[in-house]
Amino acid sequence: MIVNLVFATIWCLIALYFAFFEGVGIAFALCYIPALMFLRPVKGYALNGGWPEFGAANATIIALSVGMIFRIGTPLKIRWSLIDTLVVLAPCITITSAINTEVWHTGYNELVKQYCGWVVPYFVARFAFRSEAFREKMLWVIITCLVLLMPMVLIELRLWPHFYVTTLQKLGLSMSTDLRAEQRLGLFRTSVSFTHSIFFGDACVSLGALILVLAATTRVGLKNFWVRVGLACCGFGLFAALSGGPFAGVAIAVLTFCLLRYVRFSRPLLWVGVLAVVAVMFMFTMYLATAPMPPRPRDGSMGDSFWVRRLIVQNCWKQVQDAGLLGHGRIIAFKDIDLDSVDNAYVLFAMCRGWIYAALWIAIPLFVGTRVAKAMGRYTLSQVHIFPLAVGAATILGVSFAFYWVWAGWAGEPYTMLWLILIAFTMTLCDQCLEAADEATLQQRGLAGRPLPALATARPAFARGNGVPYGITPTARTQ
């Protein structure tokens, strides 16, 4: 573990350098994103005393926190939304649940985890997205990470499962991962640095959306060769995971994107669709909880996987019903439910942290859809913002659906954090669309010259250097 401590310390110092001299957003892109994508299996050094586990990701958060302290007073701005409220409420419920089900010190430990693995990454991403320099840097970092991961994906898919983790072990780093090999379609299911194939599949879905949103909101554009390479890497990684949940998430995302992009009247009705899906999935869960179980195929197929998901719901249903508002606690005695794992995030959320916490997670796609529809409808001078907003909202909804088939995305899990970062980017893009709409309204009323602080830095993420959105001439904008 001494090697892990030295490694995390070096990583923290590098992050501190970027946070001081390049900015918190650049440090986030250059240090936090690679930590998520490469170093999840590396054990953090236990500092004790209430400090977070000292791994690369948490070391970066410490550096970002120090950098933010030294930038107090810097003018920053977001338009507070219901999603921001949910992001703050979720940790509060988690901490309350921890205290209620265990002791006060457990609540403090959970506070530290939520700060490092939920609150700071979201709000840093939320604020930093306003900078086009940050967006470009973030785009190239994600593409570079994916290109570097792909050789490992190829090796694990056909030759040696868990090759990535075992290679890091040989370098002297202490690792935490399940080394059981899983096969499907005659291939090994790839997990590389994400510790499980389902996690990797869900991460690839979010990464593909991040590339599209970042490329569409910078001068790089969607036709860039390396952008297409990054998207191809995401597609191949999704295939290599060989997991039904991410495939289902992609299907939902593609359907939602097509509706938002091409069917205008569907945009204000998106929340209705989300509510309908929630209602259907609730009834589906009730059916799984009560219907007799068929014989198990035991052939490693998708049908076999679905049978296990049915068993999870049935064995956990009594615990879910008795969980109450604050749940039974994070630590589940698997012998009580006769399971090795609970690959259903919403069931696990309700069982461990209570009905309120599960409801907050269910509300996230609903509120995202509502705000994206508002931004699409308010800004009408151009349609160029529709594509990135549609990609962001559709993928957020798709991954939210995929959480039904995966172990809960506890704070700090890379696949969850990539999804949360996508939410932050999408919400800030909504901000900028709403600000541009407000500015256009003022111009039409002849009030554009009035110094309004709320509009002082209003510049859509899809704007050129002169602040005019792509596809709009300066004269057309002022008409």
Image: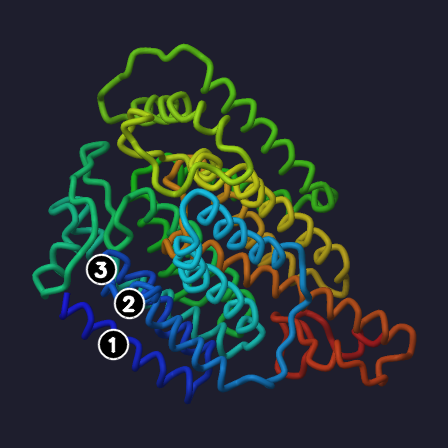
Q: Where is residue 473 in the image (x, y as percent from the top left)?
A: 74, 76
* Disc sitting over residue 9 in the figure: 1
- Mark 2: which amino acid? Phe
Q: Where is residue 296 in the image (x, y as percent from the top left)?
A: 28, 16
Q: How crowded is mark 3: few (under 14 residues within 10 Å), some or many (20 or more)?
A: many
Q: Residues within 10 Å of mark 2 (few under 14, many from 20)?
A: many
Residue 228 or 428: which is nearer the viewer? 428
Residue found at x 79% / y 73%: 439
| Residue identifier under label 3 | 43
Residue found at x 69% / y 60%: 383
Q: How far apart are marks 3 and 1 (CA)?
A: 13 Å
* Disc sitting over residue 54 in the figure: 2
- Mark 3: which amino acid? Lys
Q: Contact (CB < 8 A) between labels 2 and 1? A: yes
Q: From what the image shows, is residue 138 above or below residue 291? A: below
Q: From what the image shows, is residue 291 above or below residue 258? A: above
